Image (cartoon, rainbow, N blue to C red):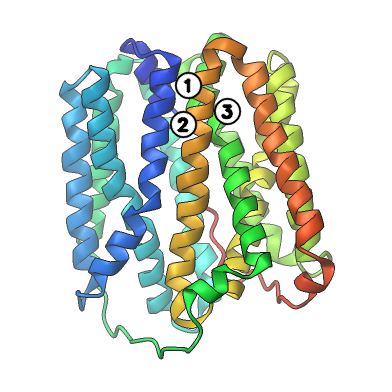
C-alpha cells in the first residue's frame, strides 16, 4: 500500500483523485467488519468464510491489472477493500478462540504482521527498481494470492458460544468516557490520512527512489515492532493515561516535523521512528481500552466499532482532507492540519478521560496487536 499513491500518480491521477481512492479504501472499514461478523454467525467453521473472502479479494484486485481510468479504479478499490477490510477482525477473533486462555501469545502471533509488512515493503521497493511501477498491481496480486493459499491450511474447531449479558451495546456507547475515547480514535486516525495517502509522494518529490521509500516505511514499522517487544514492561512503570497522552503528543510533533522539516534527512528519520508512538503505543492503549469498555458478547462489536470509527471514518476524512488540500496548501499545511487534529485529541483525553477513570482499568498489555 505505500506504493499505491505513487502508482496512481504515475497513471495520471491528480491529488484530489488519489485522496478519494484512499478515502474509499478506508471508508469500507465502516461496514465491512460488521457485515462479515454477521455472516460468520451462520458458519460453524469461520475459516471457510475467510478463505472465500480471501479469494474474492485477490480476484477483485487482479482486475486492476487492466484498468487505468479513475472511475474504474475507484469501483475496484471499493470492491477489493470491502473484502480485504472484512477479514482482519474475524481472523483476530478466530485466533483468540484458538488461544483460549493463553492470550499472552496473541501479540507474538500478530507481530508477524509487522514483520511481513517490512519484508513486503522493502522487498517490493527493491523489485520496483528493476521493473516498471506499472507492475505494482501484479506484485500486490501475488501477495494476496499467497494469503489465500495460506488460509487453505487453516481451520477452526471447537467454537464456543458466548453467554449473553443484560447490558446493551447502546448503553455502553452512551457513556461519556466511551464517546470521548471514540472521538480520540477518530481524530488520530484522521491525522494519519495524509501520511498513508501522500507520504510516498512527498518522498518521491524529495528525490528518493522506490527502494529508499520502502526503507523509510520499513523503519517506522521496525520502530513499532521494538515498541511492542517492550510495551508490557513499560506498563509496569507508567500509567495507561500517561502512555496515551504521550503518544498523542508525539503524534502532533511528528506531523509538524514532516510538515516543515521533511527536507532534512535526520528529521525525517526521527519522524519515522515516532511511528512507534503515533501508531504503536496509541494502538496498544486503544486495544486495552476497547477490551475494557466492551466486555463479554460485546467484544467483537467493540473491536468492529473501534475499526470503523478510527480506520474507517477517521481514515476516510483524513484521506479526503489531504487529497483536496494537497494541491492548494502543499504538504506543509496538510500535515500541519494533521498535527492540529492530534492536539484536539490530546485536549479531549486531558479533559474527559480522568486519572480516576484510568486507575479503574488494568493495563496488562496482554493480547495487544502490533498491526
**Which one is earlier in the sequence, the residue at label 3 or at label 1?**
1
Q: CA distance from mark 2 to mark 1?
A: 7 Å
- Residue that numbered label 2 is attached to: 122
Q: Which one is closest to the eye, mark 3 or mark 1?
A: 3
C-alpha span from label 3 to label 1: 9 Å
Task: Using the image, tell me which numbered label, if any, was put on residue 211.
Answer: 1
Say which quadrant the N terminus sits in: top left
Q: How many residues crowd around disc 3 within 10 Å: few (fewer than 14), some, or many (20 or more)?
A: many
Q: Is residue 268 left or right of residue 125?
A: right
For label 1, the SS is helix
User: x and y percent of residue 291 in the render?
Assistant: 57, 72
Residue sitting nearer the eye, 325 or 129: 325
Circles 3 and 1 in contact, beta carbons < 8 Å: no
Q: Tell me where residue 167 appears, x and y as whole percent.
A: 51, 84
> From this viewpoint, is residue 131 visible?
no
CB atoms at circles 2 and 1 under 8 Å apart? yes
Marks 3 and 2, the one that precedes in the sequence? 2
Residue at 50% x, 36% y: name it: 317
Q: How far across and down, in percent of the image, does residue 359 sit? A: 79, 75
Disc with the residue nearer the chain's start (2 vs 1): 2
Name which residue lies at 45% across and 47% down.
Answer: 312
Q: Quadrant of residue 51?
A: bottom left
Tell me the tag on residue 272: none
Residue 97 versus residue 330 in the image, above or below:
below
Residue at left 28%, top 38%?
Answer: 78
What element does badge 2 sit on? helix
On residue 216, the disc is 3
- Picture quarter containing residue 330? top right
Amino acid at each position: 500500500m505505500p506504493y499505491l499513491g505513487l502508482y496512481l500518480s504515475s497513471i495520471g491521477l491528480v491529488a484530489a483523485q488519489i485522496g478519494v481512492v484512499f478515502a474509499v479504501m478506508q471508508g469500507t472499514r465502516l461496514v465491512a467488519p460488521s457485515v462479515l461478523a454477521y455472516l460468520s454467525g451462520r458458519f460453524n467453521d469461520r475459516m471457510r468464510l475467510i478463505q472465500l473472502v480471501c479469494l474474492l479479494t485477490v480476484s477483485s484486485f487482479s482486475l486492476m491489472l487492466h484498468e487505468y481510468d479513475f472511475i474504474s479504479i475507484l469501483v475496484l478499490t471499493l470492491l477489493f477493500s470491502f473484502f480485504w477490510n472484512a477479514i482482519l477482525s474475524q481472523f483476530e477473533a478466530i485466533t483468540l478462540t484458538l488461544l483460549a486462555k493463553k492470550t499472552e501469545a496473541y501479540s507474538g502471533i500478530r507481530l508477524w504482521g509487522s514483520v511481513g509488512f517490512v519484508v513486503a515493503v522493502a522487498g517490493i521497493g527493491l523489485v520496483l527498481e528493476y521493473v516498471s511501477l506499472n507492475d505494482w498491481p501484479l506484485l500486490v496480486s501475488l501477495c494476496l494470492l499467497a494469503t489465500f493459499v495460506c488460509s487453505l491450511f487453516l481451520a477452526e474447531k471447537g467454537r464456543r458460544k458466548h453467554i449473553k449479558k443484560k447490558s446493551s451495546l447502546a448503553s455502553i456507547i452512551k457513556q461519556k468516557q466511551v464517546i470521548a475515547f471514540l472521538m480520540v480514535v477518530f481524530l488520530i486516525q484522521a491525522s494519519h490520512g495524509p501520511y498513508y495517502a501522500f507520504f510516498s509522494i512527498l518522498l518521491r518529490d524529495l528525490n528518493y527512489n522506490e527502494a529508499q521509500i520502502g526503507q523509510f516505511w520499513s523503519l517506522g514499522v521496525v520502530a513499532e515492532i521494538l515498541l511492542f517487544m517492550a510495551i508490557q514492561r513499560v506498563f509496569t512503570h507508567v500509567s495507561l493515561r500517561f502512555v496515551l497522552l504521550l503518544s498523542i503528543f508525539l503524534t502532533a510533533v511528528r506531523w509538524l516535523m514532516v510538515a516543515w522539516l521533511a527536507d532534512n534527512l535526520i528529521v525525517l528519520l526521527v519522524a519515522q521512528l515516532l511511528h512507534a508512538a503515533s501508531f504503536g503505543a496509541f494502538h496498544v492503549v486503544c486495544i486495552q481500552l476497547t477490551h475494557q469498555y466492551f466486555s463479554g458478547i460485546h467484544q467483537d462489536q467493540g473491536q468492529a466499532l473501534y475499526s470503523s470509527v478510527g480506520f474507517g471514518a477517521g481514515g476516510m476524512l483524513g484521506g479526503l482532507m489531504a487529497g483536496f488540500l494537497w494541491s492548494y496548501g502543499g504538504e506543509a499545511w496538510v500535515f500541519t492540519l494533521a498535527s492540529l487534529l492530534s492536539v484536539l485529541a490530546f485536549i479531549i483525553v486531558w479533559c474527559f478521560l480522568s486519572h480516576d477513570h484510568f486507575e479503574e482499568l488494568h493495563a496488562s498489555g496482554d493480547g495487544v496487536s502490533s498491526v
